[in-house]
Image: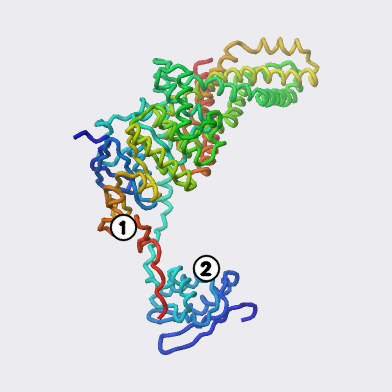
Amino acid sequence: MTNPLIKVSGLTMGWDTTILLKDASFEVEQGDIFVILGGSGCGKSTMLRYLIGLEEPMAGTIEINGTREAYLEVGRPPYGVMFQSGALFGSMTVGENLALSLDQWTDLPPDAINAIVRAKLRLVGLTDAEDKLPSELSGGMKKRAAIARAMVLEPNLIFLDEPSAGLDPVSAVELDELILSLNRALGLTVVMVTHELESIFAIGKNCIMLDKTTRSIIARGDPRELRDHSEDPRVRGFFNRQPSSQNIPPPAPTAP
Amino acid sequence: MPGTRYALNQVESGAGSRSLELGGVLTFAESGQLWVDLSKNLSEVGQGQRIDFDMSKVEQVDGGSMALLVQLRADLHRRGASAEFVGAADQIQEIIHLYRGDVRVGRRNKRRARSGLEQVGASTLAILAEFQQVFGFFGQALLAMVGVIARPGTANWKDVTPTMEKTGADAVPIVILINFLVGFVMAFQGAVQLKQFGANIYVADLVGLSVCRELGPLMTAIILCGRSGAAFAAEIGSMKVSEEIDALRTMGFGPMRFLVLPRTIALMLVLPLLTLLGDAVGILGGLFVGVTTLDLTIVGYLTETQKALDAWDIFSGMIKAVFFALVIALISCQQGLSTTGGAEGVGKRTTSSVVSILFAIILVDAGFTIFFHAFDL
């Protein structure tokens, strides 16, 4: 049995007196497409920030590749990250955005860097965007460019924050297919936060569901299994798009 | 009721129980009047009484007036009375339900107002925390600079020259204009006094010394604070709110080395040079006044200036400029990096960076003046 790629034990997320999640533990195996689910405001994107290391846990540990080493700011990171907005550097062209990490963390000559940049852009279907500024791209193109940037150092792990949110249905499906084929062909492990049920069922292999009220993980496993067999009404409600009674009033009682 | 399309009738239906018959069209446009009418009507309802809002004759109701009716109902419940909507047609009932006019009224959590003392305490703590952050940041910057001196390859040198161009070359016209006018005004003000003693020529001393020792460095720093300090804070602030700083960190680049140091180095190189230019132009401003209004010759004015100034006067101004540059770059970057909360946050931090920089520049300047005076420099 191989060691898990990400091992989270006893994680407590929050700040000051606000606690988002208490004592959560889970593991992500190599080659997984792992989805973090939950309603708005339950801390999905925050969870991603903890996994990346942008936030310090109140309690518990997060290990990637068996270590707690911090990569932020100091070294070549073993993972790629796509932020929700893309977070491309606005003062650089798309090509320069991709070349930045290659320039810093490899000894490749400039023409090899250019070749890799072009290949990565081709991979996400942005062949003619190399010399454009991020402000000239549409939302979907920005997300794809950000995925290309996250992939540029050939990491074996990639974090995606709502990759298909705000995309038209066709682009969303294309993006799902891209993620799936990267996972199949390269064994890339994907950890993503998403709301899109189609996306979750199409590509998600494993998931955890966070709950705001109990501040805990209320479900874990294969999303399709959970949809069909979960006993928990909150989990079934989420997968079957049934609002829970706390948020929206139930349908009006019919007048006698 | 004249001018309104709704009707309001009150029916007593037994001890402690009343029915309010609403009818007609309840729209948002008339909801103000409705609110006043109903509030007046219900002002004396108290503990234990029951009010029914009879909706059976209502033809139409919209969200605005429904929201007010639901609020009135909740208020009645909180006063210990009970109130319900009754007799509504299906469609009206749907709206009542949508606005939660048919659910139990919960207790409202009262927010405790903070006392004056508490507010003063909280603001003081916030200011202290801010100071701590600023000094912490200065410390980090210092460490990063030492790190870069030890290993020059780790700095982002590529950004230094473009930043120098933006903050230096592009600022030349405004630096020239402002410093010329400062010299000009100094000479004019001085001339009025000195003329009385026939000491016209000493205008050259006055302008030369005050511009080189004090006004040149100060005015140039203030210009750069407005131009570049604000620009750095806004640029880094918007990078922060659009997650670009986070992206940078996850890619293994520290914002300190990647963003702050190149800007600091560029400003520290550029500001002394601009100050030198400002000094020269300030003296020219004085010369212009001297020649046109005080009957001085160009050669006479310049010779007097040369006699009045020694190298230290100019050099001390440039030393100050280096520190001003440090203050401008570090405060603006620190403010930019502490931005939170979207576009409004960027604006707030930009403003506060300019104010803090101006304050810090004056403080540093005063410090230098005392230091130079104490050591007779």
Closest to the observer, B294 or A213: A213
* Chain of the residue under label 2: B
Q: Is residue B293 visible?
A: yes
Callout 2, which amino acid? Answer: Gly
Element carrying mark 1: helix
According to the picture, the residue beneath numbered tag 1 turns out to be A236
Task: Please name the residue shown 32% across and 48% down the image.
Answer: A20
Q: From the viewer's perspective, tell me whether residue B59 is left or right of residue B298.
A: left
Task: Please name the residue shown 38% across and 51% down the image.
Answer: A197
Q: From the viewer's perspective, tell me whether residue B124 is left or right of residue B313.
A: left
Quarter of the image for the N terminus of chain A: give it: top left
Callout 1, which amino acid? Answer: Arg
Q: Is residue B335 visible?
A: no
Q: Position of residue A228 (x, y in %)?
A: 29, 56
Image disc number at residue B139: none
Q: From the viewer's perspective, tell me whether residue A126 is left or right of residue B294.
A: left
Image disc number at residue B63: 2
Element carrying mark 2: helix
Compared to residue A235, the image places residue B37 above or below, namely: below
Closest to the observer, A123 or B317: A123
